[in-house]
Protein backbone atom coordinates (compact mmCIF):
# COMPACT_ATOMS: atom_id res chain seq x y z
CA UNK A 1 0.00 0.00 0.00
CA UNK A 2 1.09 3.60 -0.61
CA UNK A 3 3.41 4.59 2.31
CA UNK A 4 2.01 8.15 2.35
CA UNK A 5 -1.56 6.88 2.69
CA UNK A 6 -0.46 4.47 5.40
CA UNK A 7 1.16 7.33 7.32
CA UNK A 8 -2.02 9.42 7.03
CA UNK A 9 -4.09 6.51 8.38
CA UNK A 10 -1.73 6.06 11.33
CA UNK A 11 -1.81 9.81 12.04
CA UNK A 12 -5.62 9.84 11.90
CA UNK A 13 -5.91 6.98 14.35
CA UNK A 14 -3.47 8.64 16.76
CA UNK A 15 -5.29 11.97 16.60
CA UNK A 16 -8.72 10.40 17.09
CA UNK A 17 -7.52 8.47 20.17
CA UNK A 18 -5.94 11.65 21.56
CA UNK A 19 -9.13 13.65 20.95
CA UNK A 20 -11.29 10.97 22.55
CA UNK A 21 -9.10 11.00 25.66
CA UNK A 22 -8.82 14.80 25.87
CA UNK A 23 -12.60 15.22 25.62
CA UNK A 24 -13.11 12.48 28.25
CA UNK A 25 -15.42 10.39 26.10
CA UNK A 26 -16.68 8.26 29.02
CA UNK A 27 -17.55 11.30 31.14
CA UNK A 28 -19.56 12.85 28.29
CA UNK A 29 -21.60 9.67 27.97
CA UNK A 30 -22.16 9.57 31.72
CA UNK A 31 -23.30 13.21 31.78
CA UNK A 32 -25.84 12.55 29.02
CA UNK A 33 -27.25 9.65 31.05
CA UNK A 34 -27.55 11.93 34.09
CA UNK A 35 -29.31 14.64 32.10
CA UNK A 36 -31.74 12.18 30.52
CA UNK A 37 -32.63 10.86 33.99
CA UNK A 38 -33.19 14.43 35.20
CA UNK A 39 -35.38 15.28 32.20
CA UNK A 40 -37.51 12.21 32.83
CA UNK A 41 -38.50 13.52 36.29
CA UNK A 42 -42.08 14.71 36.67
CA UNK A 43 -41.03 18.10 38.07
CA UNK A 44 -38.39 18.83 35.42
CA UNK A 45 -40.30 21.66 33.74
CA UNK A 46 -41.46 23.28 37.00
CA UNK A 47 -38.47 25.61 36.83
CA UNK A 48 -38.54 26.70 33.19
CA UNK A 49 -35.26 28.61 33.29
CA UNK A 50 -33.32 25.75 34.89
CA UNK A 51 -34.92 23.24 32.54
CA UNK A 52 -33.97 25.24 29.47
CA UNK A 53 -30.39 25.53 30.71
CA UNK A 54 -30.29 21.73 31.13
CA UNK A 55 -31.66 21.19 27.63
CA UNK A 56 -29.05 23.58 26.23
CA UNK A 57 -26.30 21.68 28.04
CA UNK A 58 -27.60 18.42 26.58
CA UNK A 59 -27.56 19.91 23.09
CA UNK A 60 -23.99 21.18 23.53
CA UNK A 61 -22.73 17.81 24.78
CA UNK A 62 -24.51 15.95 21.99
CA UNK A 63 -22.98 18.39 19.51
CA UNK A 64 -19.57 17.11 20.62
CA UNK A 65 -20.35 13.49 21.47
CA UNK A 66 -22.14 12.48 18.28
CA UNK A 67 -19.35 13.54 15.88
CA UNK A 68 -16.81 12.05 18.32
CA UNK A 69 -18.64 8.71 18.25
CA UNK A 70 -18.66 8.89 14.47
CA UNK A 71 -14.90 9.50 14.39
CA UNK A 72 -14.20 6.60 16.75
CA UNK A 73 -16.25 4.35 14.48
CA UNK A 74 -14.45 5.75 11.42
CA UNK A 75 -11.08 4.85 12.93
CA UNK A 76 -12.26 1.26 13.30
CA UNK A 77 -13.61 1.27 9.73
CA UNK A 78 -10.27 2.55 8.39
CA UNK A 79 -8.42 -0.30 10.11
CA UNK A 80 -10.71 -2.80 8.36
CA UNK A 81 -10.30 -1.03 5.01
CA UNK A 82 -6.52 -1.12 5.38
CA UNK A 83 -6.63 -4.88 5.83
CA UNK A 84 -8.88 -5.26 2.79
CA UNK A 85 -6.65 -2.99 0.71
CA UNK A 86 -3.56 -4.99 1.66
CA UNK A 87 -5.32 -8.16 0.51
CA UNK A 88 -6.84 -6.65 -2.64
CA UNK A 89 -4.27 -3.95 -3.54
CA UNK A 90 -6.42 -2.75 -6.45
CA UNK A 91 -6.69 0.88 -7.55
CA UNK A 92 -10.38 0.83 -6.68
CA UNK A 93 -9.81 -0.23 -3.05
CA UNK A 94 -6.98 2.31 -2.66
CA UNK A 95 -9.21 5.08 -4.05
CA UNK A 96 -12.02 4.13 -1.65
CA UNK A 97 -9.63 4.21 1.31
CA UNK A 98 -8.18 7.57 0.24
CA UNK A 99 -11.68 9.04 -0.12
CA UNK A 100 -12.62 7.84 3.36
CA UNK A 101 -9.41 9.23 4.85
CA UNK A 102 -10.08 12.64 3.25
CA UNK A 103 -13.55 12.82 4.76
CA UNK A 104 -12.44 11.68 8.21
CA UNK A 105 -9.61 14.23 8.20
CA UNK A 106 -12.10 17.04 7.51
CA UNK A 107 -14.45 15.82 10.25
CA UNK A 108 -11.58 15.44 12.69
CA UNK A 109 -10.25 18.95 12.04
CA UNK A 110 -13.71 20.43 12.67
CA UNK A 111 -14.05 18.60 16.00
CA UNK A 112 -10.49 19.46 17.03
CA UNK A 113 -11.41 23.12 16.66
CA UNK A 114 -14.45 22.58 18.90
CA UNK A 115 -12.27 20.77 21.45
CA UNK A 116 -9.96 23.79 21.68
CA UNK A 117 -12.88 25.86 23.00
CA UNK A 118 -13.01 24.20 26.41
CA UNK A 119 -13.54 27.23 28.66
CA UNK A 120 -17.11 27.51 30.03
CA UNK A 121 -17.66 30.90 28.38
CA UNK A 122 -16.67 29.60 24.93
CA UNK A 123 -20.09 27.99 24.52
CA UNK A 124 -21.87 31.30 25.20
CA UNK A 125 -23.39 33.85 22.85
CA UNK A 126 -21.25 36.94 22.27
CA UNK A 127 -21.44 40.71 22.41
CA UNK A 128 -19.22 42.41 19.81
CA UNK A 129 -18.37 46.09 20.06
CA UNK A 130 -16.77 47.84 17.07
CA UNK A 131 -15.19 51.27 17.61
CA UNK A 132 -13.57 53.61 15.10
CA UNK A 133 -10.01 54.68 15.96
CA UNK A 134 -7.45 56.92 14.27
CA UNK A 135 -8.15 57.81 10.66
CA UNK A 136 -11.08 60.23 10.75
CA UNK A 137 -13.89 59.49 8.32
CA UNK A 138 -11.98 56.54 6.88
CA UNK A 139 -11.85 54.97 10.34
CA UNK A 140 -15.60 55.43 10.77
CA UNK A 141 -16.17 53.84 7.37
CA UNK A 142 -13.80 50.99 8.28
CA UNK A 143 -15.71 50.37 11.53
CA UNK A 144 -18.91 50.04 9.51
CA UNK A 145 -17.15 47.64 7.10
CA UNK A 146 -16.13 45.46 10.07
CA UNK A 147 -19.64 45.55 11.51
CA UNK A 148 -21.03 44.37 8.17
CA UNK A 149 -18.29 41.70 7.95
CA UNK A 150 -19.43 40.15 11.24
CA UNK A 151 -23.08 40.37 10.25
CA UNK A 152 -22.30 38.51 7.02
CA UNK A 153 -20.18 35.95 8.87
CA UNK A 154 -23.13 35.29 11.15
CA UNK A 155 -25.50 34.80 8.21
CA UNK A 156 -23.10 32.43 6.45
CA UNK A 157 -22.59 30.32 9.57
CA UNK A 158 -26.22 30.27 10.73
CA UNK A 159 -25.82 32.56 13.74
CA UNK A 160 -28.43 35.13 14.73
CA UNK A 161 -26.93 38.63 14.75
CA UNK A 162 -28.82 41.59 16.22
CA UNK A 163 -27.76 45.22 16.41
CA UNK A 164 -27.96 46.44 20.02
CA UNK A 165 -26.48 49.93 19.66
CA UNK A 166 -25.03 52.12 16.93
CA UNK A 167 -23.56 55.63 16.85
CA UNK A 168 -23.26 57.04 13.30
CA UNK A 169 -20.14 58.85 12.12
CA UNK A 170 -20.22 62.56 11.41
CA UNK A 171 -19.79 62.22 7.63
CA UNK A 172 -19.99 58.48 6.93
CA UNK A 173 -19.68 55.12 8.66
CA UNK A 174 -20.07 54.65 12.40
CA UNK A 175 -18.24 55.75 15.52
CA UNK A 176 -19.28 52.61 17.38
CA UNK A 177 -21.75 49.74 17.33
CA UNK A 178 -22.58 46.69 19.44
CA UNK A 179 -23.78 43.39 17.99
CA UNK A 180 -25.24 40.40 19.80
CA UNK A 181 -24.33 37.10 18.14
CA UNK A 182 -26.27 34.07 19.34
CA UNK A 183 -25.63 30.41 18.53
CA UNK A 184 -23.44 27.51 19.63
CA UNK A 185 -19.93 28.60 20.62
CA UNK A 186 -20.40 32.13 19.25
CA UNK A 187 -17.95 33.57 21.76
CA UNK A 188 -15.52 30.68 21.35
CA UNK A 189 -15.16 31.47 17.66
CA UNK A 190 -15.44 35.26 17.71
CA UNK A 191 -12.91 35.87 20.49
CA UNK A 192 -10.38 35.51 17.65
CA UNK A 193 -11.49 38.99 16.50
CA UNK A 194 -10.66 40.75 19.77
CA UNK A 195 -8.15 43.55 19.12
CA UNK A 196 -7.22 46.42 16.81
CA UNK A 197 -7.74 46.06 13.04
CA UNK A 198 -5.92 48.18 10.40
CA UNK A 199 -7.08 49.20 6.93
CA UNK A 200 -4.81 50.54 4.17
CA UNK A 201 -6.44 51.87 0.96
CA UNK A 202 -6.80 54.83 -1.36
CA UNK A 203 -9.32 56.92 0.54
CA UNK A 204 -12.71 57.44 -1.14
CA UNK A 205 -13.11 60.50 1.11
CA UNK A 206 -9.93 62.21 -0.14
CA UNK A 207 -10.46 64.27 -3.32
CA UNK A 208 -6.92 63.36 -4.39
CA UNK A 209 -7.49 59.67 -3.66
CA UNK A 210 -4.40 59.47 -1.48
CA UNK A 211 -3.45 56.35 0.45
CA UNK A 212 -4.91 56.34 3.95
CA UNK A 213 -4.32 54.13 6.99
CA UNK A 214 -7.15 53.82 9.48
CA UNK A 215 -7.89 51.75 12.55
CA UNK A 216 -10.85 50.22 14.38
CA UNK A 217 -11.06 48.15 17.57
CA UNK A 218 -13.18 45.07 18.16
CA UNK A 219 -14.07 43.99 21.70
CA UNK A 220 -15.73 40.59 22.18
CA UNK A 221 -17.29 39.51 25.48
CA UNK A 222 -19.30 36.37 26.34
CA UNK A 223 -23.01 36.67 27.06
CA UNK A 224 -22.87 34.63 30.25
CA UNK A 225 -26.56 35.16 31.07
CA UNK A 226 -27.30 33.91 34.58
CA UNK A 227 -24.82 31.03 34.44
CA UNK A 228 -22.09 32.91 36.35
CA UNK A 229 -22.75 35.07 39.40
CA UNK A 230 -21.24 38.57 39.41
CA UNK A 231 -21.30 40.42 42.74
CA UNK A 232 -23.04 43.59 41.63
CA UNK A 233 -25.47 45.96 43.34
CA UNK A 234 -27.39 47.66 40.54
CA UNK A 235 -28.55 50.48 42.83
CA UNK A 236 -25.21 51.50 44.37
CA UNK A 237 -22.54 50.17 41.99
CA UNK A 238 -24.02 51.31 38.68
CA UNK A 239 -25.17 54.68 37.35
CA UNK A 240 -28.07 54.58 34.91
CA UNK A 241 -28.73 57.27 32.32
CA UNK A 242 -31.68 57.33 29.95
CA UNK A 243 -31.55 59.15 26.63
CA UNK A 244 -33.16 59.29 23.26
CA UNK A 245 -32.16 56.53 20.91
CA UNK A 246 -30.00 57.65 17.99
CA UNK A 247 -30.04 56.57 14.38
CA UNK A 248 -32.87 54.90 12.52
CA UNK A 249 -35.65 53.48 14.61
CA UNK A 250 -38.87 55.27 13.91
CA UNK A 251 -40.58 58.29 15.38
CA UNK A 252 -41.31 56.70 18.78
CA UNK A 253 -37.79 55.43 19.35
CA UNK A 254 -36.15 58.76 18.66
CA UNK A 255 -38.60 60.98 20.59
CA UNK A 256 -38.73 59.09 23.91
CA UNK A 257 -35.89 58.32 26.29
CA UNK A 258 -35.91 54.59 25.57
CA UNK A 259 -32.13 54.13 25.32
CA UNK A 260 -30.28 53.10 28.48
CA UNK A 261 -26.62 53.67 29.34
CA UNK A 262 -25.15 51.88 32.36
CA UNK A 263 -21.80 52.84 33.90
CA UNK A 264 -20.00 50.72 36.48
CA UNK A 265 -18.73 53.32 38.91
CA UNK A 266 -15.64 51.47 40.16
CA UNK A 267 -14.17 50.53 36.78
CA UNK A 268 -15.74 53.15 34.50
CA UNK A 269 -16.98 50.42 32.14
CA UNK A 270 -20.05 51.70 30.26
CA UNK A 271 -22.56 50.12 27.90
CA UNK A 272 -25.42 51.53 25.86
CA UNK A 273 -28.47 49.74 24.50
CA UNK A 274 -31.01 51.41 22.23
CA UNK A 275 -32.24 48.60 19.98
CA UNK A 276 -35.70 48.18 21.55
CA UNK A 277 -38.66 50.54 21.76
CA UNK A 278 -39.09 49.71 25.45
CA UNK A 279 -36.80 51.26 28.04
CA UNK A 280 -37.37 48.16 30.19
CA UNK A 281 -36.11 45.86 27.44
CA UNK A 282 -33.10 48.07 26.76
CA UNK A 283 -32.27 48.10 30.48
CA UNK A 284 -32.40 44.29 30.65
CA UNK A 285 -30.10 43.93 27.64
CA UNK A 286 -27.73 46.62 28.92
CA UNK A 287 -27.42 44.75 32.22
CA UNK A 288 -26.46 41.60 30.35
CA UNK A 289 -23.88 43.55 28.35
CA UNK A 290 -22.38 45.15 31.45
CA UNK A 291 -22.27 41.85 33.33
CA UNK A 292 -20.48 40.27 30.37
CA UNK A 293 -17.86 43.03 30.28
CA UNK A 294 -17.24 42.86 34.03
CA UNK A 295 -16.90 39.08 33.86
CA UNK A 296 -14.37 39.45 31.06
CA UNK A 297 -12.39 41.94 33.12
CA UNK A 298 -12.21 39.42 35.97
CA UNK A 299 -10.95 36.75 33.58
CA UNK A 300 -8.31 39.11 32.21
CA UNK A 301 -7.05 39.97 35.69
CA UNK A 302 -6.14 36.30 36.10
CA UNK A 303 -4.47 36.12 32.73
CA UNK A 304 -1.62 38.61 32.62
CA UNK A 305 -0.91 38.48 28.90
CA UNK A 306 -4.55 38.97 27.98
CA UNK A 307 -4.70 41.92 30.35
CA UNK A 308 -1.63 43.35 28.63
CA UNK A 309 -3.32 42.94 25.27
CA UNK A 310 -6.33 44.91 26.51
CA UNK A 311 -4.02 47.67 27.71
CA UNK A 312 -2.36 47.95 24.31
CA UNK A 313 -5.76 48.02 22.66
CA UNK A 314 -6.62 51.30 24.40
CA UNK A 315 -4.64 53.03 21.64
CA UNK A 316 -6.57 52.31 18.46
CA UNK A 317 -4.02 53.60 15.99
CA UNK A 318 -0.33 54.06 15.27
CA UNK A 319 1.81 52.68 18.07
CA UNK A 320 -0.80 50.20 19.30
CA UNK A 321 -0.74 46.46 18.68
CA UNK A 322 -2.66 45.45 15.55
CA UNK A 323 -4.00 41.92 15.17
CA UNK A 324 -5.00 42.07 11.49
CA UNK A 325 -4.18 44.14 8.41
CA UNK A 326 -6.58 44.69 5.50
CA UNK A 327 -4.60 46.08 2.56
CA UNK A 328 -6.59 47.17 -0.52
CA UNK A 329 -4.00 49.35 -2.31
CA UNK A 330 -1.60 48.92 -3.98
CA UNK A 331 -1.42 45.22 -3.05
CA UNK A 332 -4.50 43.29 -2.03
CA UNK A 333 -4.34 40.97 0.95
CA UNK A 334 -5.46 40.35 4.52
CA UNK A 335 -2.86 39.19 7.05
CA UNK A 336 -3.23 38.21 10.70
CA UNK A 337 -0.28 39.40 12.79
CA UNK A 338 -0.62 36.63 15.37
CA UNK A 339 -0.88 33.53 13.21
CA UNK A 340 0.69 34.77 9.96
CA UNK A 341 -2.41 33.67 8.04
CA UNK A 342 -2.58 35.61 4.77
CA UNK A 343 -5.01 35.53 1.83
CA UNK A 344 -5.10 37.56 -1.36
CA UNK A 345 -8.83 38.27 -1.52
CA UNK A 346 -9.72 41.02 0.98
CA UNK A 347 -13.13 41.46 -0.63
CA UNK A 348 -14.15 37.92 0.38
CA UNK A 349 -12.87 38.42 3.93
CA UNK A 350 -14.73 41.70 4.34
CA UNK A 351 -17.79 39.90 3.01
CA UNK A 352 -17.67 37.49 5.96
CA UNK A 353 -15.24 34.77 4.84
CA UNK A 354 -13.45 34.62 8.20
CA UNK A 355 -13.32 30.94 9.13
CA UNK A 356 -9.75 30.39 7.95
CA UNK A 357 -8.55 33.22 10.22
CA UNK A 358 -10.69 32.12 13.16
CA UNK A 359 -9.57 28.49 12.99
CA UNK A 360 -5.93 29.50 12.61
CA UNK A 361 -6.22 31.70 15.71
CA UNK A 362 -7.80 28.92 17.77
CA UNK A 363 -5.00 26.52 16.88
CA UNK A 364 -2.39 29.24 17.52
CA UNK A 365 -3.94 30.06 20.90
CA UNK A 366 -3.22 26.57 22.24
CA UNK A 367 0.52 27.24 22.16
CA UNK A 368 0.07 30.78 23.52
CA UNK A 369 -2.16 30.11 26.50
CA UNK A 370 -1.44 32.34 29.52
CA UNK A 371 0.35 30.94 32.53
CA UNK A 372 -2.18 30.42 35.29
Image (tube, rainbow, N blue to C red):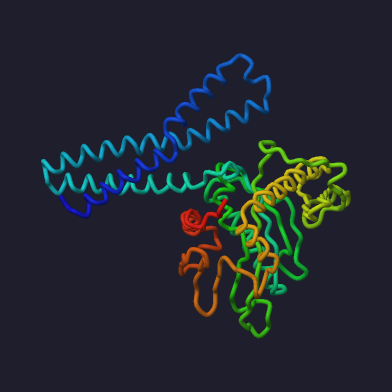
Q: Residue at x 17, y 53 (%)?
A: 2
Q: Residue at x 50, y 77 (%)?
A: 331
Classify residue 191 as left or right of residue 314.
left
In this rendered view, identify the residue nearer to me: 22 or 337: 22
Residue 221 on image: x %, y %: 65, 50
Residue 195 on image: x %, y %: 62, 62
Classify residue 76 as left or right of residue 120.
left
Residue 335 on image: x %, y %: 50, 68
Q: Residue at x 55, y 70 (%)?
A: 326
In this rendered view, identify the residue nearer to me: 290 or 167: 290
Classify residue 244 as left or right of residue 2.
right
In this rendered view, identify the residue nearer to me: 269 or 216: 269
Classify residue 96 as left or right of residue 280.
left
| Residue 208 in the image: above or below residue 216 | below
| Residue 100 in the image: above or below residue 24 | below
| Residue 312 in the image: above or below residue 44 | below
Number of numbered discs overlaid on the protein picture: 0
Residue projecting furthest to the bottom: 208
Residue 261 on image: x %, y %: 82, 51
Residue projecting furthest to the top: 42
Amino acid sequence: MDPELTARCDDLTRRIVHLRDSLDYDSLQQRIREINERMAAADFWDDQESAQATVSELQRIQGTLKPLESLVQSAEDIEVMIELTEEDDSDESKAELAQTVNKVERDLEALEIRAIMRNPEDACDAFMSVQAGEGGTDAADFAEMLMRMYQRWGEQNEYKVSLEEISPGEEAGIRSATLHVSGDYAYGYLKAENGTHRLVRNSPFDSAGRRQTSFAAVDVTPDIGDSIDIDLNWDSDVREDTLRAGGAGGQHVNKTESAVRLTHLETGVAVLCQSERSQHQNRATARKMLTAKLYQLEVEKREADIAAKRGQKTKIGFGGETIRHYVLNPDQYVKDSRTGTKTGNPGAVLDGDLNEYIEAYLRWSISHEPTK
